[in-house]
Image (cartoon, grey):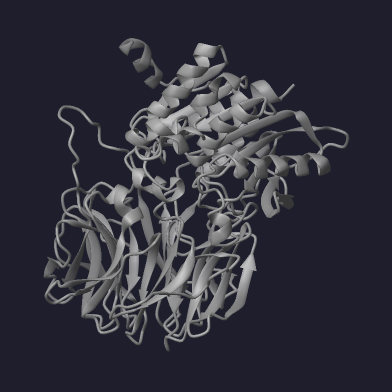
Amino acid sequence: MRSRCSGLFLLTLLSASTLPAASHETLDLLFATRTFAQAAISPDGKQVAWVEMLSNPDRTPTSGRTITVGSAAGGSERRVTAGDARKPHNEGDVAWSPDGTQLAFLSDAAKKGQLELYVVGANGGTPREVGHLTGFLSNPRWSPDGRSIALLQVESSNAKTGAVEAAARATGEVAAEISEQRITVLEVATGHSRFVTDASTYVYEFDWAPDSHRLAFIAAPGDGDNHWWIARLFTLEVGDGKMTELLKPDLQIAVPRWSPDGRSVAFIQGLMSDDGATGGDVWVVPATGGVARNLTPGRNRSPAWIHWSSDSSTLLVSEWKNGGSAISRLEVATGKTEDLWSGDETIQATFETESLSLSADGKQTAVIRSSFAQPPEVWTGVIGKWRPLTHANAGRVAPWGTAERIEWKSDGYDVQGWLVPPLTIEPGKRYPLVVTVHGGPASQATPRWPPPGPSGIPLAADGYFIFVANPRGSYGQGEKFAAANVRDFGGGDLRDILAGVDAVLATHPIDPNALGLQGWSYGGFMTMWALTQTGRFRAACAGAGISNWQSYYGENLIDQWMIPYFGSSVYDDPDAYARCSAINFIKKVQTPVLIVVGERDKECPSPQSFEYWHALRTIGTTTTLVVYPDEGHHFRNPAHIEDLLDRTSAWFGRYLKR
């Protein structure tokens, strides 16, 4: 058995002759696309610092980032680095000082793999190292008085944190190795540093109080990967480290923001399935403690990021809106909202977070924008009247057609999705359709330029229609819609998707006998599950899926996320988990399935894929399993990403094209 199973780890890259030329041209485009991790505008609105990820056209492993500072009006720009500008480094996490005279950032220029904190003048000069820290560092933020910088530090490891990263191998006597992420405060003038949170608490996010003496933060004791779902809101006195619990929330919380008048802390609370994919309602709680108040009950959007106005009377809110993005202004006293902008695109200022970067007066902004047709660029200006600041991807044209918003009814719900066609549609011809199910489930498929990875959109360049739905359980239509799949995984949300497929088939030149299905994470579960419920799909690709919720509960490293969805643990209510486990209906699957997973996936461990693959082989259904060595939930090795895309294209080509 060992030799047979271990053979799955020896990947054979597909030969160039296996794929159509369009596939390789699309891969070349995606890997060459320049992407941005952050954009930060200076307090006076005159300069912007942006962090660019090193593009990877030759597919070699890299994790470098570069920092550029330029005029917000365009024109002059310069590289900011703590090392040799001729060499790549991992530099980013930029933060302007409150007076705008300095820029803080993290860099591993002194020692590869070890980030350090640096400060440089806003107009240039030689960066100065502040303190000498070890371990993993992230999220530096200046105190309002400009004297200190707080950041997150995992002292015992310099590996990137998070549940999507590869898990450590469990060998020998297995025990939980917990590396706590703590808040460190450094004095800018002297470099003196100290931890201000204790060694038993994992801190996820924080914000300074306006007096520079206190912090608000979200934290939980113990395992950082697993306990985000039970984290609470605290305040802390920086001087003596005294912690006060401000709130034990009913659901997940994120984005704590202390009001400029010092009286309140705002945050987002909602049903969230993933740390970093924020959505919910906007809440405020008195900074001294008391009853929290929901400012957006019944809102038909999903707030994802907030920012106080200087007078503490309003909050600027970035939201998921029915498949797109939106920005609104929210009155704290009344809950009244004013729409400022919305668009069918994705906006961000900080990696994986829908947000803006604002000048001190709130008038000028910096934002990263992308859509299905537009590669990412940094834009600046007044909200909704942005102008492009960078032109890193000028000339890159999407090799697929113009995306179309699709809307339909399902079980009384208004449901929405996106249909991306091939670049050219020949009259009288019918095309295959690949349905792509997004992860989460608390997330939203928005128009964005696809990164190299399992997004599904690149397949449109190979002559497929790609359909991505936002069924119940998704963000974009408020908390009631996001919670509509609680204790109903694969029920109503699958009906929503199939109704969307019917809507697309009725109005577009698609061959109903050439339907494919794919998804990653929760989308991988939905792929595995859907094949037990319907025979409509001729081929499928299940990425990082979940085949058996009962065994999954004991295998994954983030079991706390399931409690709000199932109501209790598998040990208290096993039937709830069994009802939506694909493995219990596996004999109904006749569709050929390509199964792919990372060897060290924390979120959706590889045994789930093994279990599904083993069952399909037992019943005689065509299947292939590929386990990618050393990968976690998000793949990092470009060769593995390319192989994954190659295999997916070849698999659907084999079964859907005639």
The reply to whether residue 544 is visible in this rendering is no
Instruction: Specify whether 151 is left or right of 4.
Output: left
Q: What residue is drawn where x is 45% and y is 79%?
A: 46
Residue 561 x %, y %: 39, 48
Dividing the picture into quadrants, the one containing residue 541 is top right
| Quadrant into which the C terminus falls | top right
The correct choice, above or below, for 64 with respect to 100 in the image is above
Total numbered badges shown on the rendered structure: 0
Closer to us: 67 or 374: 374
Dividing the picture into quadrants, the one containing residue 559 is top left
Q: What residue is drawn where x is 31% and y is 77%?
A: 97
The correct choice, above or below, for 244 with respect to 272 in the image is below
Residue 159 x %, y %: 25, 46
The reply to whether residue 541 is visible in this rendering is yes
Closer to us: 459 or 516: 516
Closer to us: 415 or 50: 415
Dividing the picture into quadrants, the one containing residue 311 is bottom left
Residue 577 x %, y %: 45, 36
Instruction: Specify whether 20 is left or right of 248.
Output: right
| Quadrant into which the N terminus falls | top left
The correct choice, above or below, for 1 with respect to 338 in the image is above
Instruction: Specify whether 165 is left or right of 113.
Output: right
Residue 200 x %, y %: 16, 56
Instruction: Specify whether 13 is left or right of 328.
Output: left
